[in-house]
Amino acid sequence: MKNIVILISGRGSNMEALIAARDAGNLPVNIAAVISNRPDAKGLETAQRAGIEAHFIDHKAFAGREAFDGALAECIDGFAPDLVVLAGFMRILSEGFVRRYEGRLINIHPSLLPSFPGLHTHQRALEEGVRIHGCTVHFVTPALDHGPVIIQAAVPVLDDDTEAMLAARILTQEHRIYPQAVRWFAEDKLRLENGRVRLAAGQNDGAALIAPEVR
């Protein structure tokens, strides 16, 4: 069974989805630790209640990004993870950190990458008038919100959508696809070839999830 470490900055709803999948027997991993860059992150309490070791490393206590990333990596490595999972970790990671965990560092982003990297994705989607929006799980590379795509979920953008309405529907899909992506990794069903993710035979039907029609 593979070890994973989850990094959060706030409530950690995607972390909660991973814990729920583990507890339901649908995610064959050991969640070795949850680490936050904020001491007041609510997700730390959730992790502790679930019996998971929880730590914080306050980024404000460090002079620069590299110093913080070094301390974070030291903490992570103490748990010998096979996979590091970013679940609402609101820090731009240094290239050295990303290279250290290359091929075993994943993130979820609230858009259909490569569209709308960065922040405020739902509002930007509404402003651009796109008809399909969604979320993406990907391997992390030094480029912001970039890297080989593991799985995506798409939802329709409705004429009367607000940013909050669209965000809520997409969050539901995030909670579906993140446990799936971690499960594929845990079961050795993912491989990287020339910058693209390939799934083991019989898994390609899950490479993209399309949400049911919203009526």
Image (cartoon, rainbow, N blue to C red):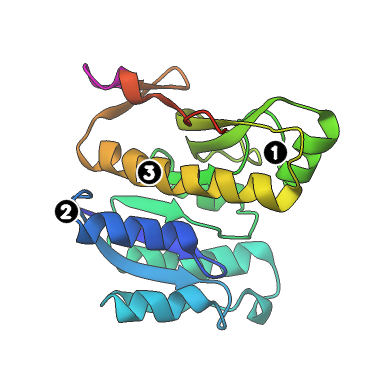
- Answer yes or no: is residue 101 visible: no
Mark 3 and mark 1 lie on one chain; the one further toward the N terminus is 3
Residue found 57% across the figure and 45% down from its top:
169
Residue tagged 2: 25
Residue tagged 3: 104
Residue tagged 1: 117
Is 24 placed left or right of 194 in the picture? left
Secondary structure, magenta segment, majority class: loop
Query: 136 and 161: which one is in front?
Result: 161
Q: Is residue 177 above or below residue 96?
A: above
The amino acid beneath tag 2 is Gly
Residue found 54% across the figure and 77% down from its top:
41
Q: Quadrant of residue 89?
A: bottom right
> Whole-Å distance between the Cαs marked 3 and 1?
21 Å
Label 1 Cα crowd, 10 Å radius (few <14 / some 14-19 / many 20+): some
Q: Is residue 7 above or below residue 157?
A: below
Mark 2 or mark 1, whichever is nearer to me: 2
Residue 61 screen position, x and y as percent: 65, 81
Residue sticking out furthest to the front: 215
Query: 72 and 207: which one is in front?
Result: 207
Q: Which residues are magenta?
A: 199-204
C-beta proximity under 8 Å, tags 3 and 2: no
Residue 73 screen position, x and y as percent: 45, 63
Query: 108 and 198: which one is in front?
Result: 108
Mark 3 and mark 2 lie on one chain; the one further toward the N terminus is 2
Circle 2 — which element?
Answer: loop
Circle 3 — which element?
Answer: loop
The amino acid beneath tag 1 is Pro
